[in-house]
Amino acid sequence: MRTLNDLSFANQRAVIRVDFNVPINENGDVTDRTRIEAAKPTIDYIRAQGGSCVLLSHLGRPKGVDLSQSLQKIVATVTEVLETPVQFCSTTVGEDAEKKAQNLGPGEVLLMENLRFHPEETEGELSFSKQLAQLGTIYVNDAFGTAHRAHASTTIMAQFFNENKCFGALLEKEVLAIEKVMKTGASPILAIIGGAKVSSKITIIESLLEKVDHLLIGGGMVYTFTKALGGSVGNSICEPEYCDYALTLIEKAKAKGVKIHLPVDVVAGDSFSNEANQKTFDVMEIPDGWEAMDAGPKSIEQFHELVLNCKTILWNGPLGVFEFPAFAKGTIAIGESIGQATKGGAFSLVGGGDSVAAVKQFGLASKMSYISTGGGAMLESLEGKSLPGIEALQD
């Protein structure tokens, strides 16, 4: 793995693939700067070495040129985060783009227009990739969130840089964090997998059974297991067609010495709303008319003990409908438990949209070892797939 430390950036022009696909409100303001802040260490390092930075990113999914999704909208925020003036180029490739890039002095930063104004970006088109490569003398990929896509800027352009390409600081941290769970983590290793459907997590669960000692299943997935084991699920979300798979999974886990943990009790509502009447039931005895929406108090207690006994923890998916404050206790509690284990020396990795949203919402982010910035890319890594954006840097 070639990292920033392996190359000299003095008087070099680094073309950096960043992930500035940030949320923007109707007033044109950036509402979450996390992704911009995550790229700052790489940009700071290159500038401190006397290199200039040409930043490439996409924003949204425009069909051709759509100025409502222009990266010009984020220039002020990027300037603020980087604490240095950021120039903007209204084109992405071509004569003007190359000229602006070549005119950069040491330490200067140039943000190019939205890559996805060009369909050739997502098509991974070779001549477009070659044009992007003209913008710099060194290629740095720091966009883990797009590393699972074989796009021009994330993968194809890397081939034009020979040895002059490397991982950015963020991408390096992401890869090492996932390796810590999948390859090098201290045992016992625990994976907490939540979410609505078993069907959407099959490949991740299958892959994790090869790596972990404990698998805690939470969220809506629980009730497919409950039904498979002969319990009643009431009105809870359930995939009856995956009951046989759930039983197979339990057997596979047993054969590999992996202990599966399910809630023993649940908090249910008589409607799918925050204002629903609440009752706690045994997970195997949820009556008709009631929908389980959170882990119950006994489960929270048991999960707390489990988490504290583990040295490496992956958290992907909430334990309940945390969007409703009335049904957020299980998700908050597991986050607090992971935070306590982390404080005691465990390594914790949080990834996947909903878990990341939960740790931010409940002020738990600072208690975790690492929070992944790449939803789809992280999930594909956990599934054991190799990511084209990472392979391109290792050629």
Image (cartoon, rainbow, N blue to C red):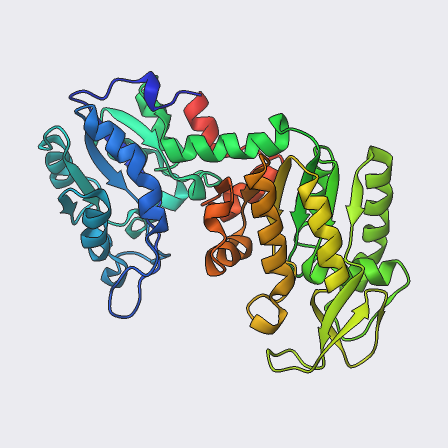
**Residue 21, x across and y down, in percent:** 35, 52
Q: Is residue 75 left or right of residue 325?
A: left
Residue 45 vertical position relative to residue 77 in the rendered view, above or below: above
Q: Picture quarter containing residue 276?
A: bottom right
Q: Is residue 389 visible?
A: no
Which residue is rendered at x = 43% and y = 27% of the image? 392
Asked whether, in this view, residue 29 is left or right of residue 188, the answer is left
* Front in this rendered view, residue 237 or 391: 237
Name the image quarter holding residue 225.
bottom right
Task: Decide: is 302 above or below 384.
Answer: below
Number of numbered discs: 0
Where residue 41 sits in the image (x, y, percent)? 31, 35
Q: Determine the residue positioned at 72% across, 70% down.
A: 267
Q: Which percent across, then down, holds residue 98?
A: 15, 35
- The residue nearer to you, when weighing 394 against 76, is 76
Q: Is residue 172 visible?
A: yes
Left or right: 260 in relation to 116: right
Q: Quadrant of residue 44?
A: top left
Image: 289 above or below 327: below
Residue found at the far right of this picture:
230
* Quadrant for the C terminus in the image: top left
Where is residue 40 drawn, in percent x and y?
A: 29, 39
In this picture, residue 187 sits left or right of residue 138: right
- Quadrant containing the N terminus in the rendered view: top left
